Image (cartoon, helix red, strand yellow):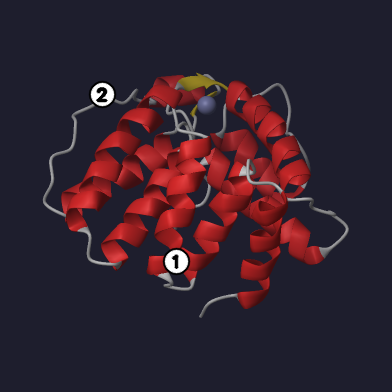
């Protein structure tokens, strides 16, 4: 079902600030989540136009295009998005786009992924969920709780630093007041998605 409250929230945001890529992205995601694919397509095209490096934007746009029956458009979007994600080291959206291309019977560029051997794991290395690199763990857990532990066990230092910068942008552009549970939920959703911890999207 379409979350009308979120639609209004993000619509107002992009009306007030037409350069707000995360506003467009979030509006597009809300439409896709609510199966409003026709509405989602132009909004996501605008998000990608504002930031062509927005890997996750290509995933959503392809879902929306597939939703309106534009298979050819979806394949083009995924092929382009795959390259963007590959270059940026966004492993999760990259893999997701590869799966979608396979589902649609389209060609997927072959790529080698680093392997975390038992020896490397025993020596305290992890394979980062976001960029796929096999690397040492962060010096310490980024914060407490289960999510902090999960990040410590599966995200590299560089990717977590990248999230800190992106998280600031999320808070500012989406004007999140983290004392509100709804805002915290949006923030966590962005973090999990950015770090590759969210399997569903
Ligand atoms: Zn990483």
Q: Residue shown at 42%/48% (left/top)?
A: 45
**Residue 115's x, y, as percent?**
34, 25
The residue most toward the bottom is 1
Q: Residue shown at 29%/35% (left/top)?
A: 80
Q: Secondary structure at mark 2?
A: loop
Q: Nearer the viewer, residue 68 or 124?
A: 68
Crowdedness near tag 1: few (<14), some (14–19) or many (≥20) residues, C-alpha within 10 Å: some
Apparent side of residue 38 relative to residue 124 in the rendered image (left or right): left
The disc placed on residue 108 is: none
**Residue 31's x, y, as percent?**
49, 67
The residue most toward the right is 179
Task: Kindly identify which residue carries mark 1.
Answer: 39
Q: Using the numbered discs, state the Cα–Cα distance from disc 1 to disc 2 in whole angstroms.
A: 37 Å
Apparent side of residue 12 relative to residue 78 in the rendered image (left or right): right
Task: Kindly identify which residue carries mark 2.
Answer: 112
**Residue 77 shows in the view:** yes
Quarter holding residue 164: top right
Q: Residue shown at 46%/38% (left/top)?
A: 49
Mark earlier in primary sequence (1, 2) = 1
Q: Residue shown at 72%/52% (left/top)?
A: 16
């Amino acid at each position: 079902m379409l979350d009308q409250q979120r639609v209004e929230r993000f619509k107002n945001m992009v009306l007030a600030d037409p350069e707000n890529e995360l506003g467009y992205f979030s509006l597009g995601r809300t439409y896709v989540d609510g199966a409003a694919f026709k509405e989602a397509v132009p909004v996501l095209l605008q998000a990608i136009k504002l930031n062509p490096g927005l890997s996750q934007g290509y995933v959503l746009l392809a879902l929306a295009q597939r939703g309106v029956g534009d298979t050819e458009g979806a394949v083009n979007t995924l092929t382009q998005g795959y390259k963007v994600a590959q270059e940026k080291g966004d492993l999760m959206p990259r893999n997701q786009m590869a799966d979608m291309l396979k589902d649609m019977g389209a060609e997927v560029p072959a790529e080698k992924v680093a392997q975390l051997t038992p020896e490397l794991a025993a020596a305290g290395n992890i394979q980062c969920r976001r960029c796929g690199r096999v690397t040492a763990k962060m010096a310490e857990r980024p914060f407490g709780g289960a999510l902090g532990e999960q990040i410590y066990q599966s995200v590299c230092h560089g990717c977590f630093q990248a999230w800190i910068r992106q998280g600031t942008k999320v808070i500012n552009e989406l004007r999140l007041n983290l004392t509100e549970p709804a805002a915290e939920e949006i923030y966590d959703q962005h973090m999990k998605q950015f770090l590759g911890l969210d399997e569903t999207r």
